[in-house]
Amino acid sequence: MNQPDSEFREKVYSYVAQIPKGRVMTYGQLAALAGHPYAARVVGGIAHWGNPELPWQRVVKKSGSLAEGYPGGLSGHKQVLEAEGVEVSDDYRVDVERLLWWPPTPGQNSLL
DNA sequence: CGAGTGACCGCAA
DNA sequence: ATTGCGGCCACTC
């Protein structure tokens, strides 16, 4: 089986992989969902060295600004997001208030 | 087990 | 608005 990857990383991978196109999530949010609301830095580390197949481009900061260190720089990140349908301002910021996405919360929906 | 690092977050000046 | 500092957690040496 796989290596004993930390549950934290497993969750982060899972959530990031489920972010729908045109939506974004924040590092602190992913960290909180993974079980540690203050481990946003860890999420950043995972984003840098984690599975490159995942859409990390949809992961932004809490302030809405794009992350630093993305291959291609902010300009590259911006263009990728725009290609996904996310509006990015010239200041490399996205409307988190509007595009922020949360995973399906159980119990809220009557459909199991 | 200790120290350093990091695609962050929040607060103070 | 920007800059500086601490903190939190996982990973590596």
Image (cartoon, coloured by chain):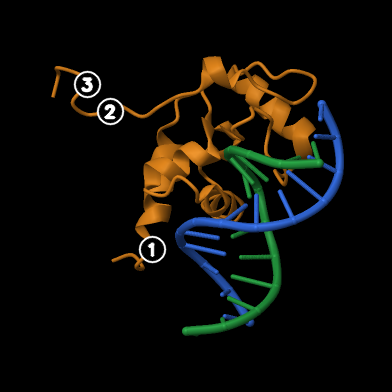
Chain colours: A orange, B green, C blue
Answer whether labels 3 and 2 touch (C-beta < 8 Å). Answer: yes
- Report the quarter where the C terminus of chain A lies: top left
- Report the quarter where the N terminus of chain A lies: bottom left
Q: Which residue is at a point 38% across and 61% down the rendered structure image?
A: A6
**Which chain letter goes with mark 1?**
A
Please tell me whether residue A37 is drawn above or below residue A25 in the rendered image: below
| Relative horizontal placement of residue A87, taking residue A111 as reference (left or right) | right
Q: Mark 1 points at which residue?
A: A5
Answer whether labels 2 and 1 touch (C-beta < 8 Å). Answer: no
Image quadrant where residue A78 sits: top right
Answer whether labels 3 and 1 touch (C-beta < 8 Å). Answer: no
Please tell me whether residue A98 is drawn above or below residue A38 in the rendered image: above
Q: Which residue is at a point 76% across and 34% down the rendered structure image?
A: A74
Mark 3 secondary-structure assignment: loop
Between the C-alphas of marks 2 and 1, the distance is 24 Å
Mark 2 secondary-structure assignment: loop
Is tag 2's residue or tag 1's residue first in the polypeptide sequence?
Answer: 1
Please tell me whether residue A67 is drawn above or below residue A98 in the rendered image: below
Mark 1 secondary-structure assignment: loop
**Which chain letter goes with mark 2?**
A
